[in-house]
Amino acid sequence: MSLKDTIKRTSLFKVLNEYRWREHMTHPGSKYPDKTFYVIRRHDMYAGLFSFVATNIASIKVCLDNGYVPVIDMKSSRNSLLLPDEVGKINAWDRLFDQPFGFDLDDMKMARNVILGSIHPPESFPDYRMLEDEEELKMWNELGRKYVRDCMKAEDVQKADDYMKENFGVDGRVLAVVARGTDYISKKPWNHPIQPDVKTMIEDAKKLMEEKGCDYLYLATEDNAIWDMFEEAFPGKLYSYQKQHYDVPDGKYIADVANDIQAPLERNREYLISILIVSKCNCLLAGASGGTYGALLMTDGYEYKNIYNLGRYK
């Protein structure tokens, strides 16, 4: 096949795929005739948990603005929370969260009015931009607390509460640090937020621990190199719910390594509980990343927060 024919076939596939997964109304059944449901879909094999959280929250906002009932579908296409043989069988969202209004994909088979959403997320969603606009941050936080944190599985919320009580007591003051992996720092993905140098974070954390009277440092990271540096800097004061930390070879992303060692469900559940713990700490020091955005969506507020605003990789 010539290059020209290959391009034509590829272009045709894209057109057909876009048509197949376009936003459109369907009428599968006759139940709930007074409601219009909106099935939130996104095709992205590589996006992480909190990337999906962010775009799903944005789609929920679109539904609320238009009077639709949102139902999240992380079953119909491959994503980082499912094993390949689970696609089409298990809704990854339902493993970690309750559906926002209690209706699930099985209900959609019998509903009268069901809009199947576009596979492309809304243009406006909680990301780097909300760090520069307190009103926008407040708006996303209100939605995040209601439709992310309060929809978490009760047993996972309990695990976070038990962890904090067992390790920090009732009055222990905790500085949370969210550090994106060294894979991200070395690869510098285009247009993504620039991450702070780990040594800089450690020095800033030391100052904050003293200034804010924090007894403990809670570190959310999967990167073993970062964990070792913090452990050396904060002996006896460093904690993390995440049991696994990974060494990442050059040219690899941490997810490539982690998913070979830990099942996606187990890994992402640990990560979610870890970020919930971050959201409950007294102070926050973090690079701009998905986990940080997740904590900002779920928190009731921090006494102090510093999110490094260093621009974007070019």
Image (tube, rainbow, N blue to C red):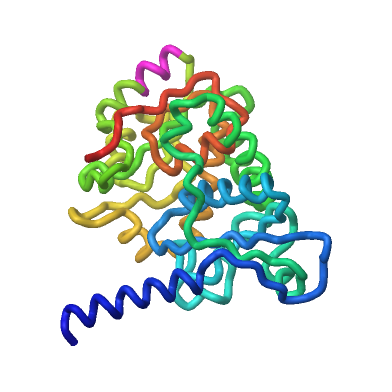
Q: Quadrant of residue 9?
A: bottom left
Q: Position of residue 89 (x, y in %)?
A: 57, 76
Q: Is residue 158 visible?
A: no
- Depth check: give the residue in front, 160 or 86: 86
Quarter of the figure with the C terminus: top left
| Displayed quadrant of residue 132 | top left
Q: What's the magenta bit mostly, secondary-structure-wise? A: helix
Per the image, is 121 magenta?
Answer: no
Which residue sits at x=44%, y=50%? Answer: 243
Number of disc labels: 0
Q: Nearer the viewer, residue 174 or 72?
A: 72
Find the residue positioned furthest to the bottom. 1
Residue 256, image x and y in percent?
31, 61
Residue 195 in the image, given as x and y percentages of width and height: 30, 35
Q: Is residue 104 visible from the viewing direction of this image?
A: yes
Q: Which residues are magenta?
A: 205-211
- Residue 207 forms part of the magenta stretch: yes
Asked if residue 155 lies left or right of residue 265, the reply is right
